């Protein structure tokens, strides 16, 4: 138990982990397998994938397409008529607007890799998303994912989503309109870790999640995120957890029906800066 109040503890932690290198780009082993590939980003555009970012995929790829659930959201406002993905004004691929986890407009084996940053927690049925990403990725392709560690965010008072819960969501075909976690996400939101305030409009935005998609349906630790990725059949190649709240994972989709052996990885998960 820290002797410092939260308002002091967080800045002190930030200074500690900055000194230890948590704000430096990750090793190239996270991005090298994606070099020269045709990539799809789910959500975004994302600063960590840009030039100078933690995992700069955009400048390494042959092309990066993008999918958004809508042209306008809390995080972006795009021209719904545009067909070009141009993060930072630089055209690098095609822009899709598909509000369906199945991504029916995208053919099988289209991409060499998928990338996403802070998306998986917003999905009501993450395992369904993985099913799609596997379908549209060529055998042996990759997934580079960034997800928030719950202890570093406003979700730190919530319980980590269990794998069994995710399986139940998949088996039920849980839609994005599912409201199971909305009350919890409002009541346990830690405003010490957020610039927002609990205004009437803030609450209304969460009550309207089917159109806003701001709610975190699920919350993850490093161990729980890796367990989910193992469950869906990806080989875990690289992972790390960085302050203030990010879990980075590079996985590889199988080339056949075999299940990858991630036992050693799952037994030795580095908890990062949050569980020490």
Image (tube, rainbow, N blue to C red):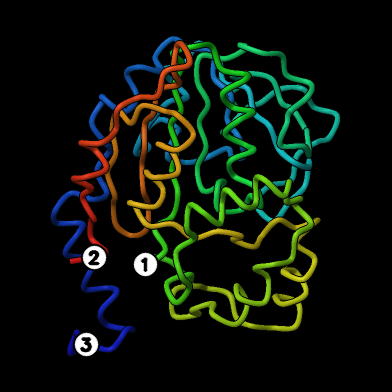
Cβ atoms at labels 1 and 2 below 8 Å apart: yes
Could you say where residue 54 lies in the image, as x and y percent from the top left? Answer: 34, 39
Instruction: Identify the image quadrant of the C terminus.
Output: bottom left
What number is the disc on residue 275? 2
Q: Residue at x 48, y 52 (%)?
A: 163
What number is the disc on residue 151? 1
Sequence-wise, the earlier of marks 3 and 2 is: 3
Q: Residue at x 62, y 12 (%)?
A: 110
Q: CA distance from mark 3 to mark 2?
A: 17 Å
Q: Looking at this view, is 147 or 270 the one in front?
A: 270
Could you say where residue 123 lies in the image, as x and y percent from the top left? Answer: 64, 49
Q: CA distance from mark 1 to mark 3?
A: 17 Å
Q: Is 69 situated left or right of 214 in this image?
A: right
Q: CA distance from mark 1 to mark 2?
A: 8 Å
Q: Which residue extends farthest left?
A: 20
What number is the disc on residue 4? 3
């Amino acid at each position: 138990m820290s002797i410092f109040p939260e308002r002091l503890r967080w800045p002190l932690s930030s200074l500690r982990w900055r000194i230890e290198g948590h704000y430096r780009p990750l090793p190239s082993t996270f991005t090298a397998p994606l070099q020269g590939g045709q990539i799809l980003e789910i959500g975004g555009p994302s600063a960590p994938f840009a030039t100078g970012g933690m995992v700069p995929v955009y400048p390494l790829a042959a092309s990066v397409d993008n999918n958004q659930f809508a042209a306008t959201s809390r995080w972006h406002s795009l021209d719904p008529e545009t067909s070009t993905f141009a993060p930072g004004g630089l055209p690098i691929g095609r822009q899709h607007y598909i509000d369906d986890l199945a991504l029916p407009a995208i053919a099988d084996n289209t991409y060499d890799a998928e990338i996403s940053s802070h998306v998986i927690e917003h999905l009501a049925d993450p395992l369904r998303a993985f099913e799609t990403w596997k379908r549209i990725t060529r055998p042996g392709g990759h997934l580079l994912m960034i997800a928030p560690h719950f202890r570093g965010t406003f979700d730190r008072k919530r319980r980590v989503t269990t794998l069994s819960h995710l399986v139940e969501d998949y088996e039920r075909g849980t839609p994005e309109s599912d409201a199971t976690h909305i009350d919890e996400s409002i009541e346990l939101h830690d405003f010490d870790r957020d610039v927002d305030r609990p205004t009437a409009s803030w609450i209304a935005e969460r009550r309207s999640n089917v159109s806003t998609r701001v709610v975190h349906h699920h919350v993850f630790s490093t161990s729980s995120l890796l367990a989910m990725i193992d469950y869906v059949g990806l080989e875990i190649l690289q992972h790390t957890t960085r302050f203030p709240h990010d879990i980075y994972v590079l996985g590889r989709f199988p080339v056949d029906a075999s299940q990858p052996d991630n036992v050693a990885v799952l037994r030795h998960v580095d908890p990062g800066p949050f569980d020490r």
